[in-house]
Image (tube, grey):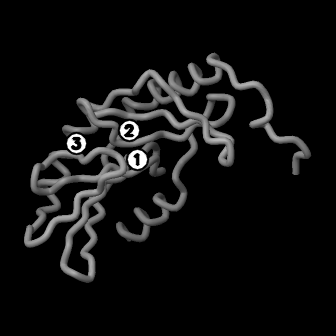
Amino acid sequence: MRSWRRGAQQLSEELARRAIEAVKAALPYVVAGPPLIHRGPAGELHVDVPLMYHGFALDRIHCDPVAKTPSPKGRPAHVYGVEVRREEVVEVMQRVVRELRVVEAAEFRDPEDAWMVPLAWRLYIVAHVKVSYEGSELVPDYGLTEEVRRYVA
């Protein structure tokens, strides 16, 4: 266990740049995972699609099944009385993933000791990719990865 906090060290634009470049290098290998379709107790429907990188989930994109587009990060679409065809969600999200771009900015999350690099689809930020402090490794969302594995199994 370390006795000092890395977050107390000086952050630099170079570290942020490395994190952004790491996400840019990985983006061509990111694919849409299986749609996670959830029904709530009142009958509402919510659809998320995980972004997968070498078998690990990085983040989830909220999908609006009515508009057939992603929703901005922080605004999951909850719909009522709509049937969702899994194949249609897969088709839409495969196109969306091909259109993703890395935003040239990064935020630092001190408690996690990691950078968060946003991904945009058109004018929406739809996901964040966590990158190690040094900007050298993508950090998976392990909880989401387990959810995907349970859902697919």
SS at mark 3 in the image: helix
In-image side of 109 versus 93 (left or right): right
CA neighbours of label 3 inside 10 A, class few (<14), some (14 to 19), many (20+): some
Q: Is residue 101 above or below residue 144?
A: above
> Quarter-wise, where is residue 5 in the image?
top right
Q: Which residue is mark 2?
A: 30
Q: Amino acid at mark 3?
A: Gln
In-image side of 74 versus 26 (left or right): left
Specify which label sits upstream in the sequence, 2 or 3: 2
Q: Which residue is mark 3?
A: 94
- Rendered image: mark on residue 52: 1
Specify which label sits upstream in the sequence, 1 or 3: 1
SS at mark 1 in the image: strand
- Rendered image: mark on residue 78: none
Q: Residue at x 44, y 43 (%)?
A: 53
Q: Residue at x 30, y 52 (%)?
A: 75
Residue 144 position, x and y percent, is 46, 59
CA neighbours of label 1 inside 10 A, class few (<14), some (14 to 19), many (20+): many
Q: Nearer the viewer, residue 10 or 147?
A: 10
Q: Nearer the viewer, residue 95 or 10?
A: 10
**Do tag 1 and tag 3 residues touch (Cβ < 8 Å)?**
no
Residue projecting furthest to the bottom: 41
Residue projecting furthest to the top: 14
Q: Nearer the viewer, residue 152 or 124?
A: 124
Q: Residue at x 63, y 29 (%)?
A: 136
In-image side of 10 versus 126 (left or right): right
Q: Is residue 31 above or below residue 106?
A: below
> Quarter-wise, where is residue 84 in the image?
bottom left
Q: Residue at x 45, y 31 (%)?
A: 26
Specify which label sits upstream in the sequence, 2 or 1: 2
